[in-house]
Amino acid sequence: MDDLQTAFRALQGPLARTKQRGGLINVWALASLRRDEVRNAAALAGLWMPEFGGETSMRFAVSYLATAIPAIDWSQELCGGYRVATEICPLGDGADRVDLVIETARHLVGIEIKIGAVLGREQLQRYSKAIARRGALQGLTPWVVLLAPFRTELPAIASSSWADVTRAARSVAGDRDGDRSFVAQLIESFGEHVREF
């Protein structure tokens, strides 16, 4: 009992400092994203946009892509410029709406996001064909990634998990005791928000 009281007393100072900095509430919980796939995809896309967080956003995207598709030097690729968009119909067909797309000078990455839903009938195969066709039309190398709490058995589709997003967010968050930017704190809190997906 004395050890527990000593531990609580020791935590009072750090908790007070964290509360003062606004670090006790996850803004993503306040935004009521919950497990909504469309809203979480939009939040993730926003955090990856260089217009939002500059180099920090880029490093977050690089860290995730390096795990999902390790064959490419994403740091070099994204440094050349990139765009992020959500709810993209690669060929204009509304039935094949890819949740998130990252386009660089040489690559087109379609990311299908699942949290609680299951894949539709041949969904990944259709998306793969659509991304491949759009990539061919634009002269870009196509990639399709499934970001989900389960893996795909399709060899042409990369599998990643929400734990990969959490690790990527933590990798750019920096030292908790140091001076972290607001963007880094926001990214880390998003990583914590999706950790249990």
Image (cartoon, grey):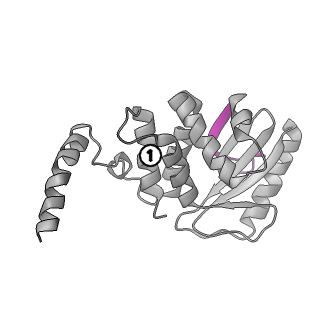
The amino acid type of the residue labelled 1 equals Glu
Q: Is residue 38 visible?
A: no
Looking at the image, residue 12 sits to the left or right of residue 160; the answer is left
SS state under label 1:
helix
Q: Is residue 119 magenta?
A: no
Magenta region: 82-93
Residue 128, percent across and down? 79, 56
Figure quadrant of residue 124: bottom right
Looking at the image, residue 5 sits to the left or right of residue 196; the answer is left
Residue 180, percent across and down? 40, 34
> Residue at point 34% right, 49% down?
26
> Residue at point 18% right, 53% down?
10
> Residue at point 37% right, 35% down?
178
Figure quadrant of residue 196: bottom left
Q: Is residue 159 above or below residue 69?
A: below
Q: Is residue 14 above or below residue 75?
A: below
- 34 or 19: nearer the eye? 19
The residue to which callout 1 is attached is: 188
- 190 or 169: nearer the eye? 169
- Badge 1 crowding class, 10 Å Cα cut-off, few under 14, some 14 to 19, many 20 or more, is many
